[in-house]
Image (cartoon, rainbow, N blue to C red):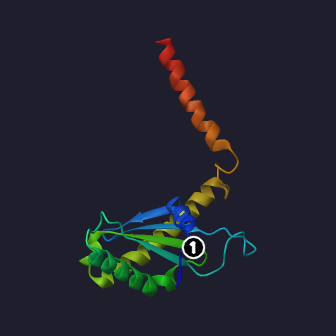
Amino acid sequence: MERLKKRRDYLAAARGAKAVRKAFILQSRRRNDGRDSTGGDAGPARFGFTVTRRTARNAVDRNRIRRRLRQAARLAAPAAAPGHDFVLIGRRAALSVPFDDLVADLENAMMETEAVETNEEARSGGDNDMDNGEGAQGHGGQNETRGAARKQT
């Protein structure tokens, strides 16, 4: 199992698909490093883990949550799609959920986020609207319309 180590990888995963579970939040994205012929990265799935101080004040509890999530990811890694990055954000419930349920939830969440990414790509035709500048223009148009409506009344 490979790990995410750079902040930019965590931030990129945060912009991807999300699956919320009782014990964790899974963020996922397909890497686009251009290492294979389809424009994606055919390397193994990578995992990152984070548990905030807000989740557990005690460092011992935060580390226990992180260890449980890391082991669940090791067991679920064969089910992970290659070329994807996953970030697990631990929640307090990760301490009390039975471990087998934690692994099953992680596998289901990985399948769910992969399905969401596939649906989004099919809808957009594989292009990201923000890359071609359309996203910034569309948002500005909405604000102008609202302003014009206020002036008329």
Location of residue 32 by image quarter: bottom right
Q: Position of residue 98 (x, y in %)?
A: 26, 82
The residue sitting at the left extreme is 96
Specify the amino acid type for callout 1: His
Location of residue 128 by image quarter: bottom right
- Crowd rating for badge 1 (residues with CA inside 10 Å; few <14, some 14–19, many 20+): many
Residue placed at 30% from the left, 68% from the top? Answer: 22
Q: Is residue 94 above or below residue 15?
A: below
For mark 1, what is the residue? 84
Q: Secondary structure at mark 1?
A: strand
Q: Is residue 88 above or below residue 68?
A: above
Q: Position of residue 149 (x, y in %)?
A: 50, 19
Q: Is residue 79 left or right of residue 61?
A: right
The residue sitting at the top extreme is 153
Residue placed at 62% from the left, 43% from the top? Answer: 135
Q: Position of residue 7 (x, y in %)?
A: 54, 66
Q: Nearer the viewer, residue 73 or 55?
A: 55
Q: Is residue 31 above or below residue 133?
A: below
Location of residue 84 by image quarter: bottom right
Q: Position of residue 5 (x, y in %)?
A: 54, 74
Q: Nearer the viewer, residue 127 or 32?
A: 32
